[in-house]
Amino acid sequence: MGKRREPRLEFSIREILIYEEIVKAEELLSRNNLSLGQNLDHILGIYNKGQLIGTGGIKGNTLRCIAIDQSYKGTNVLNKLISELIKIQYFRGNTHIFIFTKPSAKGSFNHMGFYEIEEVKNEVVLMENRKSGLEEYLKSLRDYKTCGEDIGAIVMNGNPFTLGHRYLIERAAEDCDHLHIFVLSSEKSTFSHKVRYDLIKKGTEHIKNITVHSGGPYIISEATFPTYFMKEKSDKSRIHAILDSKIFSKNIGPSLGINTRYVGDEPYCKTTNMYNNILKEILPSHNIDLKVIKRKSHDHKPISASLVRDYMKNEEYEKIKNLVPNTTYNYLVSEEGKKIIKKIKGKEERH
C-alpha cells in the first residue's frame, strides 16, 4: 500500500472585519489564555480552507494578540502570520517593531528575529526586532550623564504643561544635583509630542540643573505601557506598569546614574496611582528611591492638565491663566492653540 498523504494546507491571510470573525478570533485567543486588545489598528486572521487557525493584531508599532490553533503549532503558520504583520508595519512606516507575547513563546519569536527587552514572570515578555535597540537608546542617554551624588528623574506627559508640572520640577530640582525630565513620546495625547516637549523646555528655562529628554519607545510608550493611555484599570494594566517600571529601574536609571525618581501625588487617576505604587515596590530593589511630592493646588483643587483641557473645551481662558505658565498660555491663545480646541471637544483624555 502507498504512503498516506497528509491533507494539503491552503493558507490565506486577510484582515478580520466582520463581527462573526472577530468572535472567532476572540475564542481562539481565549483558548490560548489571551484576550483581544482594545482599539487595535488591524486584526489579521490566517485561514486553512476557510477555517480560522491563527490571529494577530497591530497597535501602533507593536504586534500583539497573537495566537495559533493548537493543532497547527510546530508548523509554519506562525511564521506566515508574523511575516504578514511585519509587512503591514513596514508599509505603515514602522521599522522598529515591538511584540508582546507569553514567555513560553519567546523562543519562537527569537528565531524570527525578535530580541527580549524585559519579562514579567509567567505573564508577558516584551521583544523588539533590533538586537541592540535598547542598548543604542541607553548609549544616547549616557551622553547626558552628569556628575553629582543626587541625580533625579521625572517622567511626564504635560498635556499641556501646567503650573502643577512646573511646581513638581522645581521641587525636585531643589532636592537633587541634576534632574532628568522625560517627556512621553507617544502621540496619543491632544498635544503633539513636539508641542509638549517645547512647552516644557520653555516653561523651565529658569531652572538650570535640568535636562529635558524625549521619552522614546522605552518609557510609558505604546510598547511598554499601552494601557496608560486608555484609562484602563485592569490586571493587564498592572502587568504593563510592572514591565515599564522594570525597564526604567534596570536600564534607563542606571544609564544616567539616577538614584531618585519623583512623582506627584495622585488623588484622582487610579491608573497613575497604581503605577506610582508599583514604582514604590520595584525601584528600591535597584537602588532608586521614589519621592512623592504633594500636588500644587489652586482654589483648593489640585492643578491638572485635564482641568485645563476642560476649560479649553469651554474656551474659559481666564480660568486657564491661573493654571499654566505664561509660555503655555501664550501658545493656547495662539492660532495654532485655538485649532486644538476642535480636537478637545467631545474627547476624554489622560493628563
Image (spheres, rainbow, N blue to C red):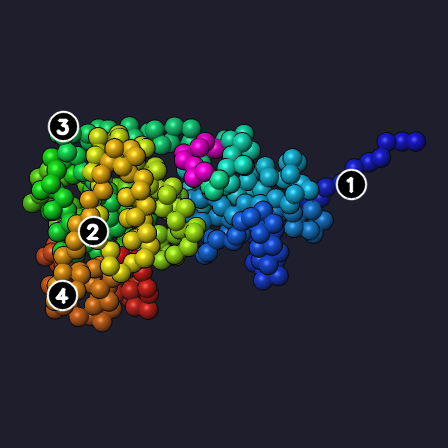
Q: Are marks 3 and 2 in contact (CB under 8 Å)?
A: no
The number of discs equals: 4
Residue 299 percent coordinates (x, y)? 12, 67
Instruction: Please tell me how crowded label 3 is: few (under 14), some (14-19), or many (20+) other residues with Cα within 10 Å.
Output: few
Q: Which residue is mark 1?
A: 7
Please give the name of the residue rendered at 44% of the width and 44% of the height, measured from the top-left corner. 62
User: Tag 1's secondary structure?
Assistant: loop
Q: Mark 3 or 2, which is nearer the eye?
A: 2
Could you give the CA–CA distance between mark 1 and mark 3, rounded to whole angstroms?
Answer: 67 Å
Horizontal and vertical percent position of residue 61: 42, 44
Residue sitting at x 48%, y 40%: 122
Q: CA distance from mark 4 to mark 2?
A: 16 Å
Residue marked by disc 4: 300
Within the magenta stretch, is there residue 283?
no
Q: Position of residue 28 (x, y in %)?
A: 61, 51
Q: Amino acid at mark 4?
A: His
The amino acid pointed to by label 1 is Pro
Can you tell which quarter of the image residue 250 is in? top left
Q: Residue at x 28, y 38 (%)?
A: 283
Disc 4 and disc 2 in contact, CB within 8 angstroms:
no
Q: Which residue is farthest left?
A: 206
The answer, for residue 56, to whether it is visible in the render is no
- Determine whether, in the image, residue 243 is placed left or right of residue 292: right
Task: State whether residue 32 appears in this view.
Answer: yes
Q: Nearer the viewer, mark 4 or mark 3?
A: 4
Q: Earlier in the sequence, mark 1 or mark 3?
A: 1
The residue beneath circle 2 is: 264
Q: Residues within 10 Å of mark 4 (few under 14, many from 20)?
A: few
> Can you tell which mark lies on residue 180?
none
